Image (cartoon, grey):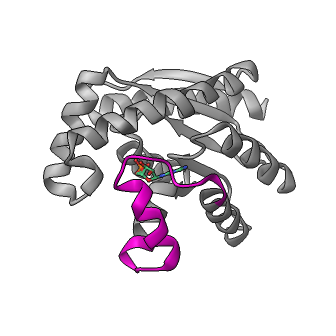
Amino acid sequence: MLMFNLILFGPPGSGKGTQSEKLVEKYGLVHLSTGNLLREEIANRTPLGLEAKNFIDKGQLVPDEVVIGMIGSCLDHHKKASGFLFDGFPRTTAQAQALDKLLALKKTEIALVLFLEVSEEELVNRLLNRGKTSGRSDDTNETVIHQRFTVYKNETAPIADHYKKLKKFQAIKGEGSVEEIFASLCQAIDKRMKALAS
Ligand code: AMP
């Protein structure tokens, strides 16, 4: 069976986590969020979690080899998956290249990259609001939030070009109600699935 692998792309606070939960339910994909996986490691006080916390608390990226290793073992654990939804990964060129290689080993590839477009002002408001209830230390400090945006612009945003060249990249308006945004995402996915099936 053909796998459908999706990347939900966008800056911190663009709604990747919220929309991912709805999308994996609708399409039966396996949700791979490196942020969630790292927070689980921190909660379990593993050596990996303790190392990652130093970076996360400063708004910096966790080293490539750590997150690539996590994704590699998750892909191995889900041999029968009908597809994966990558949320918060890849975030650097090295991660994007590693993902291509890992998927090629499974004789599959990325089908579509959906980019949630949200203004920076709205992003800061969303993150500060989320910080009030999420308990996420990286969402409460405005300096850390701005550092995460800088990292996003310098290291993550440029990898969009890789997927644009492959004609796999599509921007979606990420402002509006959760349901409106979800409907736009579903429309793009359904169209791509149809094109791949024909
Ligand atoms: P997120 O929940 O996706 O916003 O991730 C929270 C934090 O975890 C980020 O600010 C990074 O410090 C770290 N992180 C998550 N995913 C990655 C990744 N793919 N590469 C490097 N660091 C990551």
Number of callouts: 0
State whether the magenta stretch is mostly helix, strand or loop: helix
Q: Quadrant of residue 79?
A: bottom right
Task: Residue 103: give x, y in percent of width and height.
Answer: 78, 50
Depth check: 45 or 100 in front?
45
In this orientation, does residue 31 appear? yes
Q: Residue at x 75, y 32 (%)?
A: 196
Q: Quadrant of residue 72?
A: bottom right
Is residue 59 shown in magenta?
A: yes
Task: Please state if 44 lies on the left or on the right of 102 as rendered.
Answer: left
Task: Residue 164: give x, y in percent of width and height.
Answer: 68, 20
In this orientation, does residue 10 appear? no
Task: Please state if 9 lies on the left or on the right of 138 as rendered.
Answer: right
Is residue 164 shown in magenta?
A: no
Task: Residue 99: give x, y in percent of width and height.
Answer: 72, 48
Q: Residue at x 67, y 37 (%)?
A: 93
Q: Quadrant of residue 128?
A: top left
Depth check: 109 or 193 in front?
109
Question: Considering only vertical position in the picture, is 84 above or below 11?
Answer: below
Question: Considering only vertical position in the picture, is 140 above or below 172?
Answer: below
Task: Residue 52: give x, y in percent of width and height.
Answer: 47, 63
The C terminus sits in image quarter: top right
Depth check: 169 or 100 in front?
100
Q: Residue at x 81, y 48 (%)?
A: 101
Q: Residue at x 16, y 42 (%)?
A: 129
Q: Which residues are magenta?
A: 41-65
